[in-house]
Amino acid sequence: MFRVALVPLLMLAAGLWWIDGWLMQSAVRFLAWWGFCGLGTLVLLMFAIFDALCVIREERGRRP
């Protein structure tokens, strides 16, 4: 899960500090980059929700 979280964080950092000039040259690049960053964040959110639901299911199974 850490690796999945690291991808959007690194994309965010890269888009804000390292390649911001390159992204500003084209609207398509800008929208594609931030779209993929948002998609990575949504995937991370789905993993987190899935993990929480698994924990809830596991805890419900332990109760007598």
Image (cartoon, rainbow, N blue to C red):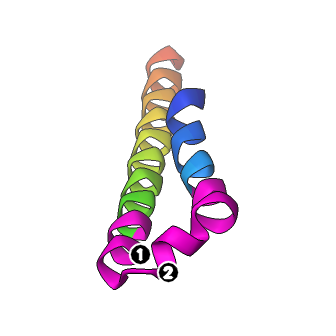
Coordinates of residue 17 in the picture (x, y in percent): 70, 63
Classify mark 1: helix, strand or loop. Answer: helix
In the rendered image, residue 55 lying in the magenta stretch gets the answer: no
Coordinates of residue 40 in the picture (x, y in percent): 42, 51
Q: Residue at x 45, y 59 (%)?
A: 37
Which residue does the numbered mark 1 point to in the structure image? 30
Q: Is residue 10 left or right of residue 34?
A: right
Coordinates of residue 61 in the picture (x, y in percent): 44, 19
Above or below, comparing residue 56 to residue 21 in the picture: above
Q: Amino acid at mark 1?
A: Phe
Above or below, comparing residue 51 to residue 13 in the picture: above
- The answer to whether residue 46 is seen in the rendering is yes
- Place residue 15 in its image quadrant: bottom right
- Place residue 20 in its image quadrant: bottom right
Label 2–label 1 contact, CB within 8 A: yes
Q: Residue at x 47, y 51 (%)?
A: 45
Which residue does the numbered mark 2 point to in the structure image? 24
* Labelled disc at residue 63: none
Q: Amino acid at mark 2?
A: Met
Along the line of sight, the residue nearer the viewer: 60 or 22: 22
Along the line of sight, the residue nearer the viewer: 1 or 16: 16
Mark 2, Cα crowd under 10 Å, few <14 / some 14-19 / many 20+, is: few
| Real-space CA distance between mark 2 and mark 1, rounded to the nearest whole angstrom | 6 Å
Q: Is residue 58 left or right of residue 12?
A: left
Mark 1, Cα crowd under 10 Å, few <14 / some 14-19 / many 20+, is: some
Q: Residue at x 38, y 48 (%)?
A: 43
Classify mark 2: helix, strand or loop. Answer: helix
- Stretch of the chain drawn in magenta: 12-34
Above or below, comparing residue 20 to residue 44 in the picture: below
